[in-house]
Amino acid sequence: MTGSTSPVLDEAVLAATAQVLAEHGWHDFTLERVAQAAGVSRVTLYRRGITKDVLLDALVVGAAQAWQAALWPAVTGPGDGAARLLQAMRAACAVVEEHLRLLTGLSTLPDPVFHLDGTEDDGGRGTREVYISPFRRLIQDGQADGSVRPHLEAEQTATLLFNLLTRTYLHMRVGHRWRSAQAADLLLELITPGLLTRPADPEE
């Protein structure tokens, strides 16, 4: 949107956007449906400067902020790289669980949100680095202290780990209706042997 006036968004409209995306997918996502779910008129959204792109950008930025907040304790906390990597993986499952409906809707976009490599001026959609960097940092920390396998290339492994963990967790929860603990526990049990130089502690 051009001009000096920023779009006026509120929690009700954002919640309605996530609801419409989850129920109808991007193909059938319309401002009329968002307005109806939010209990306002289509004209009201127009007068607030709200478009489909504005709504999408707000959801993408919100998802990135939630991801950063969830993984920050693992990135900055105590412990070796392996322990903090396991902590981050569990936090990743938890944040997907917390935003299950939103991420189900975002997964229907024609261009997957998590793959977009943009700039700070792209409306908030250049978010890939936000999701990959915590895993990359923890893999590198673990390689430095000997707790993560040294032969792994950090960037590639972080990218694979993010996609394998979050997308599989989302699919098992939504597509197969597994319990949250079941999906997280089995995923970590399968993934961690390829990452760590020692067996993972079941309590981590």
Image (tube, rainbow, N blue to C red):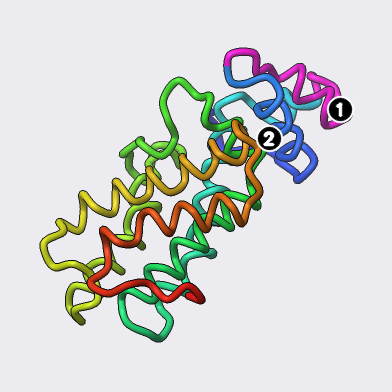
- The reply to whether residue 6 is in sight is no
* Numbered disc 2: secondary structure: helix
Tell me the residue at 41%/25% (across/down): 111
Which residue is disc 1 drawn over? Answer: 40
* Residue 42 lies within the magenta run: yes
Point out residue 201 in the picture as x, y percentages from the top left corner: 42, 76
Q: Residue visible at 41% across and 39% down?
A: 114
Residue 115 visible in the snapshot:
yes
Q: Which residues are magenta?
A: 27-43
Can you tell which quarter of the image residue 117 is in?
Answer: top left
Q: Residue at x 29, y 48 (%)?
A: 159
Residue toward you, 194 or 76: 194
Real-space Cα separation, disc 1 to disc 2, in angstroms? 16 Å
The three-letter amino acid code for the residue at tag 1 is Val
Q: So how many labels did they put on this image? A: 2
Query: Local crowd at mark 2 within 10 Å, few (<14), some, or many (≥20)?
Result: many
Give the prevailing secondary structure in the magenta stretch: helix
Name the residue at 73% across, 32% down. Answer: 19
Q: Which residue is mark 2?
A: 18
Query: What x and y, as percent, mark residue 82?
Result: 32, 73
